Image: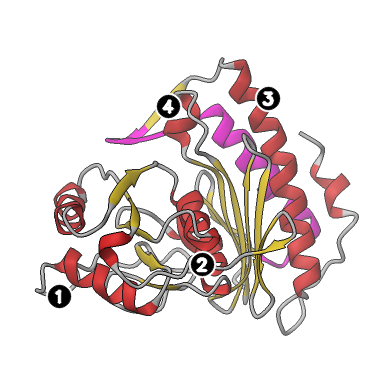
Amino acid sequence: MNRPRAAAQRHPRRTGPGPIGADASLALAVELARTAGARLLHLFTDGGIRPVTKSPGQRSSAADVEADRYIVDAIRTALPGHRIVAEESGASGPESDHTWIVDPLDGTHNFLRGRPDWGVSIAYAYRGTVMTGVFHAPTTDALYTATRGGGAHRDGHRLQVRPASHLAQSLAICSASPPPWKDTARRILDGLWGSVLDIRITGCGAAALCQVAEGSADVFAEVDGEMWDYAAGALIVEEAGGTLTDYAGRPVTSRSADVVAAASRSLHAQARAEMAGERGAPAGPPGDLL
């Protein structure tokens, strides 16, 4: 990968009050996602990356670590006063109103098995509110972006959720969860299985959120993630006109560890009701790494 300073020199340093500008945060996130994605794609086609088990059901690899190091170092060089929370390296940097949330390789299991659903997710948040979100899918070269109040786009084209109001005609994407979430995930699947037209389990939460935003899916539900899985994709859905909350019905923030997204408020309400079995939506503890 390119040296971090090469990217950092093209972006102004900003540590003062107020969020950094949408253009600046978006330009940096796009550049880093594309550069990391290009290297990951090379490793993906090479096929020589071996998995590393982090915990039961959770895997990482040298590719995750390399991409994480490149993105974190580049942000730290460009914006040394900002906080960074990344999947592989954790939280770093000073306490700050500015936080970058990084999943250097979302969909690691897919990546390791030669499946195409994986990518790089980068979000910028100010005081806990995500302002910029980027997801790059190297295998298709698709680039999803959003800025708060500025809309969501794929490769420069404005995104809009697919009009949908009936759960029975919807395509849903769900998570397959390792312990300790497998029982909750099974209840969610049981609730949706007979209520939607079809279900997919893709193994890449950020990509699934982008699919809701672009209209190729109608509902997404996952309970076993972390903030880096959802921060960028949640903003992309929101700016495309979709509705999403966590499992307790609270707004999705940079600290959320679960998500229910849908193409409309009506669809969202129907999905939550079915997943809860009319007993109230299941809620897991929110992530809190900032």
Above or below: residue 228 compared with residue 158: above
Element carrying mark 1 = loop
Please name the amino acid that badge 4 sits on.
Val
* Mark 4 element type: strand
* Stretch of the chain drawn in magenta: 54-82
Q: CA distance from mark 1 to mark 3?
A: 45 Å
Amino acid type at mark 3: His
Tell me the SS state at disc 3. Answer: helix
User: How many discs mark residues in the rendered view?
Assistant: 4
Residue 218 part of the magenta-drawn span: no
Q: Which mark is residue 52?
A: 4
The residue that disc 2 covers is 161
Report x, y in % for residue 103. 54, 49
Q: Is residue 74 magenta?
A: yes
**Location of residue 269 with respect to 27 vertically, above or below:** below
User: Distance between the Cα atoms at labels 3 and 2?
Assistant: 32 Å
State how far apart marks 1 and 2 are (Cα).
Answer: 26 Å
Q: Amino acid at mark 1?
A: Gly
Q: Which residue is mark 1?
A: 280
Disc 3/disc 4 C-alpha distance (Å): 19 Å
* Residues at discs 1 and 3 in contact (Cβ within 8 Å): no
Q: CA distance from mark 4 to mark 1?
A: 37 Å
Labels 1 and 2: the sequence-earlier one: 2
